[in-house]
Image: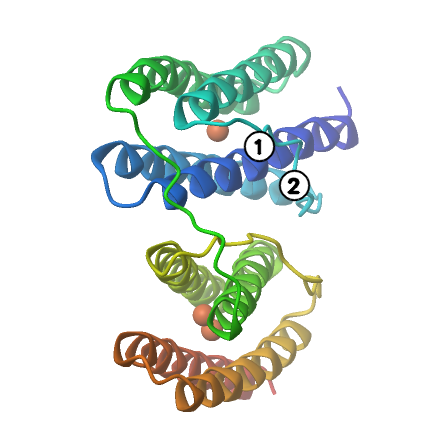
Amino acid sequence: MKKEEIITLLNQDLEGEHGAIIQYLTHAYAMGEGEMACEIEALAREEMRHFDWLSETIVELGGTPSLKRGEMRMGGESVSDWMKNNVLLEEDGIALYREHIKVIDNPKIKRLLQRILSDEESHHGDFQHFVEKAQKESAKDIRGARRDRITDILNWGIEHEYTVILQYLFHSYMTRDKNVRREMEDQAINEMQHLGWLAEEMVDGGGSPRIEHIEVDQSTKTADMLQTDIKIEQEVAAEYDRAAKEITDPGLKKLLIRIRDHEVYHIEVFSDLLKKKK
Ligand SMILES: [Fe+2]
Ligand SMILES: [Fe+2]
Ligand SMILES: [Fe+2]
């Protein structure tokens, strides 16, 4: 099988992982703090590892990881319906991995897909179990319909964080500079924390997070990446600062200031790396 064909198949898998991550996180946030929500978040984290492995393999083959998000199964009236959708999404993934394992002849990649497949089979069982558990515990969607200036700010933050998570991951996969790679990955993980904090704040405050992103920079030259990333961090640090001044709720104010301080740190880290490139 040609490299290009393998890359196409792995990108399909990657898009599936992306969809699964967002589907499961949306559920976990909407359920609040219970044990099941934590377990679902842990499964989303396993999908993130798959996302990472697949992206790295695609780059090793000379390809570019796709940032498209695969089909999600987002309907459902109750948590137990959501868990049924997650069972179905895992079935979609399992079928695709089985097919790809059959047709890909590279032993190392076959082995990786086998490894991922065994996780998906285990997730499938977990979600089947959650269908019943959700019924028994009458687990609820605790999101509310609140829409005001605060929910606008939180949704703006979530949109930004989701965008830079993808952007820094993409940059970490594409750069050839080891230090940049490490920092990009580290800051992407930090942005995941921000996204989680903002989404939880939204649900606790009676709102409903909207997990969508805007355009992701796909520069492939390290200096271009860093320049773009510094610019976006400067803009959002200023915006978080402005929002923190506007908000009177002390808890939310503190959260926005904490995130702003992280973004300022990102500006400094990226600026140092850029200096070394010049
Ligand atoms: Fe996965
Ligand atoms: Fe952030
Ligand atoms: Fe940042």
Q: Taking the image as four quarters, which one is ligand 2 found in? A: bottom left
Q: Secondary structure at mark 2?
A: loop
Numbered label attached to residue 69: 2
Type of amino acid at the residue the image marks with label 1: Met
Q: Residues within 10 Å of mark 1 (few under 14, many from 20)?
A: some
On the image, numbered disc 1 is attached to which residue? Answer: 74
Q: Residues within 10 Å of mark 2 (few under 14, many from 20)?
A: some
Picture quarter containing residue 8? Answer: top right
Relative image position of residue 87 (x, y in whole percent): 47, 17
Q: Earlier in the sequence, mark 2 or mark 1?
A: 2
Mark 2 CB within 8 Å of ligand 1: no
Q: Is residue 276 visible?
A: no
Type of amino acid at the residue the image marks with label 2: Arg
Relative image position of residue 253 (x, y in whole percent): 33, 81
Relative image position of residue 213 (x, y in whole percent): 63, 58
Relative image position of residue 151 (x, y in whole percent): 49, 66
Q: Secondary structure at mark 1?
A: loop
What residue lies at 63% left-to-right and 71% top-to-bottom? 222
Horizontally, residue 229 falls left or right of residue 209, namely: right
What residue lies at 67% left-to-right and 35% top-to-bottom? 11
